[in-house]
Amino acid sequence: MRSLVQATLAQHLLPLVIPEFPGITVGGAFAGTAGESSSYREGLFEMGVEGVEVVAGDGRVAWAKEGELEGLRGSFGTLGVVTALLLRLRPAGGWVECVYRPVGNLVGELRKGIDGEGWEFLDGVVFGKGKGVVCQGRCVDEKTFGPEVRRRRVSRGRDKWFYQILERVSQTGISVTELLPTEDYLFRWDRGGFWVARYAFPYFLCPFNRLTRWALDRYLRADVMYRALHFSGLVERYVVQDLGVPVATAEGFEEFLDREMGIYPLWLCPVKVEPIGAGIYKDKGDGGAEMMVNFGVWGLGPPGKESMLEVNRRLENEVARLGGFKCLYAQAFYTEAEFWNIHNKAAYQELRAKWGAEYMPSVWDKVKRIEGKEEKASRSGLARLKTKLVEVRPVRGLYGVACAVIGREYLLREPEEGQKSA
């Protein structure tokens, strides 16, 4: 995604929606559902795609335009491989004016922002019950602002993580206006993976400060951090969910999350969801767009496998009850019957036949919960012994980091200013 942003910004243009991490691929954003702070106006990333080239499951190469795109959106690569896309672009400046305001009712403020004018970006973070920060932004010409408006960077190792800036606003109760370079703003959540990387510091008994964040910066970017989390198996102990509910029910859902889980911070991002026609997602049939609020729920879950399963199942059931959706990149705990009750199996099977992909793994095959390391370890005495040794803190975490380093994932990031590429 970084290459796309840099190429289009050079022409003073941007796609309608840019996902928050630079390592997300353009094809993955189209096929896997992606939204960000411009989504309250523009919808999901795939709604800005006007055509795609696909290598279908049967090997043929086809160009899909409007009318065929609907089935490919959200198909998670199970119908074919996307090799080229035609994107709508919009004018963009080199800087983003950002305004952060402390609020007591973030959902209410987001609803006001949805109906307002003059802003291109809208999202927010809840740091605790009644402690939110709403963020609004728009592309601007930096020269029209005087020196009293701060110019800030958030992409370099020596910079603060973006969430720390918002946390400070929540603590002081003082609104802040500042300018960020457009690329910094678009990928503002990359360092620290929103805030999830902060959990690594107490796990490794490491202080969380400016020096340690700088020293470990290469390993605390979203791509490397999440790979290390999965390699280590520690992801099994965390709730990792993106959940969308209708805006009218969002306040109640926030109360549910506070009561049932108490995980903070929470990322809230309003998203305009367009009817997408035939495909894996069921169409509600009213023909109009619906405003949803996406909740990013990422944090340490309750101890024990059964407790983790229960809390995730309660989340899925509540979202379904409210008529919402969940992003399928996240952990899925549905049974197969439940999954297809929510999704349109008949339409999806027709698409698999159309694209010659019936032999390929289905969306259900890709998103279903896979037996975790701890469950596999229960099968034999030797495996249990090995797992107990790995469980010694911080062996498991070091193993995950080592896998990411050996795989050289940490070298995929663009070098900072003044650094030479390897």
Image (cartoon, helix red, strand yellow):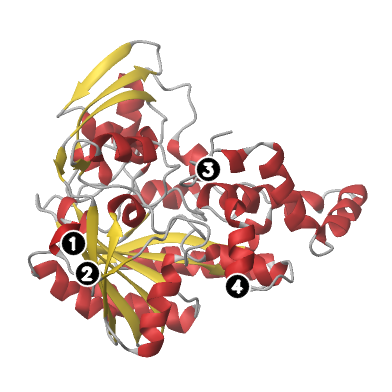
The answer for how far apart the CA atoms under marks 4 and 3 are is 23 Å
Disc on the earlier residue, 3 or 2: 2
Q: Position of residue 397 (x, y in %)?
A: 73, 57
**Dot 2 amino acid type:** Val
**Which numbered mark, 4 or 1, is in the foreground of this view?**
4
The answer for how far apart the CA atoms under marks 4 and 1 are is 39 Å
Q: Please, what secondary structure does the residue beneath circle 4 have?
A: loop
Disc on the earlier residue, 2 or 4: 4
Q: Residue at x 38, y 60 (%)?
A: 153
Disc on the earlier residue, 3 or 1: 1
**Which numbered mark, 2 or 4, is in the foreground of this view?**
4
Question: What label sits on residue 209 in the rendered view?
Answer: 4
Disc on the earlier residue, 4 or 1: 4
The answer for how far apart the CA atoms under marks 3 and 1 are is 43 Å
Disc on the earlier residue, 4 or 3: 4
**Dot 4 amino acid type:** Asn
* Up-down relation of residue 199 to residue 2 (above or below): below
Q: Are marks 4 and 1 in contact (CB under 8 Å)?
A: no
Residue of label 2: 247
Residue of label 3: 419
* Up-down relation of residue 77 to residue 222 (above or below): above
Q: Position of residue 328 (x, y in %)?
A: 42, 49
Question: What label sits on residue 291 in the rendered view?
Answer: 1
**Which numbered mark, 4 or 3, is in the foreground of this view?**
3
Q: Please, what secondary structure does the residue beneath circle 3 have?
A: loop
Q: Are marks 1 and 2 in contact (CB under 8 Å)?
A: yes
